[in-house]
C-alpha cells in the first residue's frame, strides 16, 4: 500500500518580518487617521464654542452697553436675571493639537468694556480658518497670515480689527520670500533701500531673518505696503496696538502694569535680526511685547523707528501738535490738551523712566510721524515715543516701517 504524506510548509522568517511590517504600517496609518479625525472633531467643537460665546457676548452688550469684565469656563454669561449662555464651554482636551498652547479659551475685556479679545487655537484648517492661534472680537474672527499678528480694533481710536507685521518690514526675493536680505547694509546694520530699492524682483515681508528696511521715505514705505495688498500702519492703529500692549502685565519687568519698566526699550546691540529671539526669555523681555492673545510683536522700540501713515500740523488749537521739537515727557501738562490723548500712554503720570518714550513736536510743519525707538539708546526710545521732526521724504538709517492688512 502506498502512503502519501502532505507536508505543510510554514512562513519563512523573511515572510514573517514582511507581514509584521505591513501590519505595523497599517496600524500606524489607522492610528494617525484616527488621531486626525479626533483633532478635527475638537477643532469643530472649538469653533462652535467660540461662536456661541461671541453670540452671548453680543446679546450681553446689546442689553448693558458693555462687554463683561470676565467670563469663566463652566459659569454662565448673565446679567440681572437675563441668561445669555448657561455654561461657558471649556477648550476640549487635549489642547496641544499641532503645538497649540495648553490653555483654555482666554477672554480679555478691552477699553472699559467697549471691545474684547477672545483667544483660541485650532490644530488645523477648520471651515475657512487656518490652523494656529486665533483672536475673536466683537466683529468676527481675525485670521492673519504667516508673519502677521491680530489686533482687535479700538472704539477710542476708531479702528477696525487688523493684522500687523510681527516683525519690522524686511526686503525679500519674490521667488524666495522667507528670508530677508542683509545687504546692502547701512553703517548701523539696516538694509539700505536707498542703495538698492526693494522692488522689481523683490518685495517687503514680515520675516524673522534679515535686517529691517531703512533709508526709505514715508511715501515709499506706503507704496511698498500697497504693493503687497496692505497699507502703511497709521498712528491710530499704532495707538490701538500700544494701548493694549501697555495693559499686559507680562510686558512690565515687575509683572504689574505701571510698575517698573515697560519691556522692549533699547538695549545694547544695535539693529537686530529677529531670528531666534522667540526662544530666549531675555530677548523676549528686551525686544518683544506680548498681546493678550499671547502672541509677540518684535522690535517696536529698540531697532529702528517706524513711519506711520500720518502728517502732523503744528500750531495752537484743536488738532494741532506743539511745534517745539525738544523731547518732552508725556507727563508734562503742555501735552494735556491734545497730544497725550491721541498719541500717548493712558496714564498721565508715566514718563521715560517707565520706558514709554517721549514726545518731540511738529517742526517743521506738516512733518511725518515716526513712532517707537531706534538703536541710538536715548531715553526717548519706547512704545509711545513720537518724533514729529522729520519730513515725509527723509531718508534715515534709523527709520523703517510696518505694514497692516
Image (cartoon, rainbow, N blue to C red):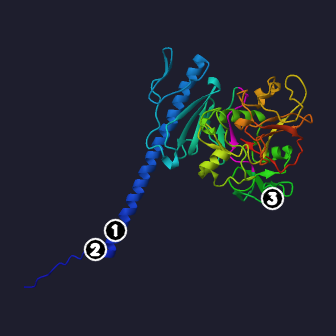
Mark earlier in primary sequence (1, 2): 2
Q: In the rendered view of the protein, which quadrant contains the C terminus?
A: top right
How many angstroms separate mark 1 from mark 2 (CA)? 10 Å
Residue in the foreground of this view, choosing between 179 and 332: 332
- Quadrant in the rendering for residue 383: top right
Outermost residue to the top:
80
How many angstroms separate mark 2 from mark 3 (CA)? 69 Å
How many angstroms separate mark 1 from mark 3 (CA)? 60 Å
Kindly identify which residue carries mark 1. Answer: 19
Could you say which disc has been placed on residue 185 in the image? Answer: 3
Kindly identify which residue carries mark 2. Answer: 11
On screen, residue 256 above or below 270 = above
Q: Residue at x 54, y 32 (%)?
A: 51
Give percent across and percent down for residue 68: 56, 23
Q: Seen in the image, is 172 located left or right of residue 32?
A: right
Q: Secondary structure at mark 1?
A: helix
Give percent across and percent down for residue 301: 73, 43
Q: Is residue 244 magenta?
A: no
Q: Residue at x 53, y 47 (%)?
A: 124
Q: Is residue 166 magenta?
A: yes
Q: How many marks?
A: 3
Mark earlier in primary sequence (1, 3): 1
Mark 1 and mark 2 residues within 8 Å of each other at the beta carbon = yes
Mark earlier in primary sequence (2, 3): 2
Q: Seen in the image, is 172 located left or right of residue 250?
A: right
Nearer the viewer's eye, disc 1 or disc 3?
3
Q: Secondary structure at mark 3?
A: loop
Give percent across and percent down for residue 306: 78, 43
- The magenta span reads 156-169
Amino acid at each position: 500500500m502506498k502512503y502519501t504524506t502532505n507536508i505543510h510548509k510554514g512562513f519563512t522568517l523573511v515572510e514573517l518580518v514582511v507581514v509584521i511590517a505591513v501590519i505595523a504600517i497599517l496600524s500606524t496609518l489607522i492610528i494617525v487617521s484616527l488621531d486626525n479625525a479626533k483633532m478635527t472633531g475638537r477643532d469643530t467643537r472649538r469653533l462652535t464654542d467660540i461662536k456661541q460665546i461671541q453670540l452671548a457676548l453680543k446679546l450681553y452688550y446689546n442689553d448693558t452697553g458693555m462687554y463683561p469684565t470676565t467670563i469663566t469656563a463652566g459659569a454662565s454669561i448673565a446679567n440681572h436675571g437675563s441668561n445669555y449662555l448657561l455654561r461657558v464651554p471649556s477648550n476640549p482636551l487635549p489642547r496641544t493639537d499641532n503645538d497649540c498652547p495648553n490653555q483654555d479659551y482666554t477672554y480679555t475685556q478691552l477699553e472699559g468694556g467697549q471691545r474684547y479679545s477672545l483667544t483660541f487655537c485650532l490644530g488645523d484648517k477648520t471651515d475657512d480658518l487656518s490652523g494656529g492661534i486665533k483672536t475673536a472680537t466683537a466683529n468676527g474672527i481675525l485670521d492673519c497670515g504667516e508673519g502677521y499678528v491680530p489686533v482687535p480694533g479700538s472704539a477710542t481710536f476708531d479702528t477696525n480689527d487688523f493684522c500687523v507685521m510681527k516683525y519690522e518690514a524686511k526686503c525679500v526675493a519674490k521667488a524666495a520670500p522667507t528670508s530677508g536680505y542683509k545687504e546692502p547694509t547701512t553703517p548701523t546694520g539696516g538694509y539700505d533701500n536707498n542703495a538698492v530699492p526693494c522692488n522689481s524682483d523683490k518685495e517687503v515681508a514680515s520675516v524673522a531673518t534679515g535686517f529691517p528696511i531703512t533709508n526709505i521715505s514715508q511715501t515709499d514705505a506706503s507704496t511698498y505696503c500697497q504693493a503687497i495688498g496692505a497699507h502703511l500702519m497709521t498712528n491710530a492703529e499704532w495707538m490701538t496696538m500700544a494701548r493694549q500692549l501697555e495693559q499686559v502685565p507680562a510686558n512690565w519687568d515687575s509683572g504689574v502694569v505701571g510698575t517698573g519698566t515697560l519691556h522692549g526699550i533699547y538695549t545694547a546691540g544695535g539693529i537686530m535680526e529677529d531670528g531666534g529671539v522667540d526662544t530666549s526669555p531675555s530677548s523676549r523681555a528686551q525686544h518683544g511685547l506680548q498681546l493678550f492673545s499671547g502672541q509677540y510683536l518684535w522690535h517696536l522700540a529698540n531697532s529702528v523707528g517706524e513711519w506711520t501713515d500720518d502728517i502732523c500740523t503744528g500750531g495752537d488749537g484743536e488738532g494741532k501738535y506743539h511745534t517745539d521739537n525738544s523731547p518732552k515727557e508725556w507727563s508734562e501738562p503742555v501735552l494735556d490738551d491734545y497730544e497725550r490723548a491721541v498719541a500717548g500712554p493712558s496714564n498721565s503720570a508715566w514718563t521715560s523712566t517707565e520706558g514709554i518714550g517721549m514726545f518731540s513736536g511738529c517742526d517743521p510743519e506738516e512733518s511725518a510721524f515716526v513712532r517707537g525707538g531706534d538703536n541710538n539708546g536715548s531715553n526717548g526710545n519706547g512704545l509711545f515715543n513720537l518724533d514729529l521732526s522729520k519730513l515725509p521724504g527723509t531718508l534715515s538709517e534709523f527709520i523703517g516701517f510696518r505694514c497692516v492688512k
